[in-house]
Amino acid sequence: MADPQWWRQLHWAEYGAEMLGTAFNIFVGLSAVVFDFGKGLPMEQLIPNSSARLLMTGLIFAGSGSLFAISPLGKLSGAHINPSVTLAFWIQKKMHRQDVLGYIIAQFIGATLGAFFLARFWGNYAASVNNGMTQPGNGYTAWYAFLAEVSITFLLVLLIFIFVSSYRLMQWTPLMTWLLVATMVWLEAPISGTSLNSARSFGPALMTWLWQDQWIYFIAPPLGSLLAVIVFKLVTFGEREILTGKLCHVSHYPSIFKNVKAPCANQ
């Protein structure tokens, strides 16, 4: 018979941190999208070059995620704020099954909250850019956008694994993800919107209630994540081990992850 107190064994603090971190990332990141591209706002006149505005947007969007990673809440949960990252760590046997589910549910709730507050705060300005929805760009087919999402998620997860499998590099993981994702937004957003994250796409789509081509963002990022796990094992011949499940690992913070090699409290 199942333990009636099973819910007490779940890691609610970490799930809550993931929810708040995802909401923060979505609200701040999509606020940058609205501010830089919303109709009726001054940025289009101040900076006519859309590529420059995309770079600014990427730096803010990605920067909010990296800022959360180095915050106390991010150090607690590991700051995945992305189901594709959580899935990758689980496949690498770094997470318990119930925690994978808790993290992913928290990320989708957080993305929905972030998109909700974005729509309420920015109003018609947010609506003018479909609340920051990810969609294939003009001139690109859905399948081209799909392959682009697979590729960029693959690269993100692979580089995270390379960094968190090295004692020398793992402290720089938040900086790496900031620069990498900002560059992806700058260069790749015109193709697919640079989702990398099914929850990030779900929140704005729900607020806008527009689901055209959204299958791309539910399938492509997890597929890219799975490919990154496979390639990491192949190129390291299975001999390089993931040291932590966190993007910013600090030894005096507890860890709920499995098979952690980096020092941590109350493992």
Image (cartoon, grey):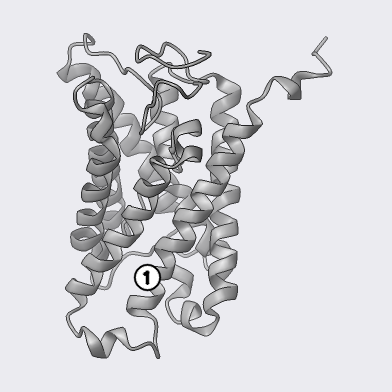
Q: Nearer the viewer, residue 30 or 228?
A: 30
Q: Is residue 206 above or below residue 88?
A: below
Residue at point 58%, 62% (across, down): 206
Residue at point 32%, 54% (across, down): 63
Residue 133 visible (yes or no): no
Q: Is residue 43 above or below residue 133?
A: below
Q: Position of residue 169 (x, y in %)?
A: 20, 27
* Furthest residue toward front: 252
Q: Position of residue 154 (x, y in %)?
A: 26, 38
Q: Is residue 176 above or below residue 14?
A: below
Q: Nearer the viewer, residue 97 or 261?
A: 261
Q: Quadrant of the N terminus?
A: top right
- Which residue is tagged 1? 33
Q: Position of residue 78 (x, y in %)?
A: 44, 32
Identify the image quadrant of residue 175.
top left
Q: Nearer the viewer, residue 259 or 249?
A: 249
Q: Residues within 10 Å of mark 1 (few under 14, many from 20)?
A: many
Residue at point 27%, 40% (across, down): 156
Residue 242 visible (yes or no): yes
- Circle 1 SS class: helix
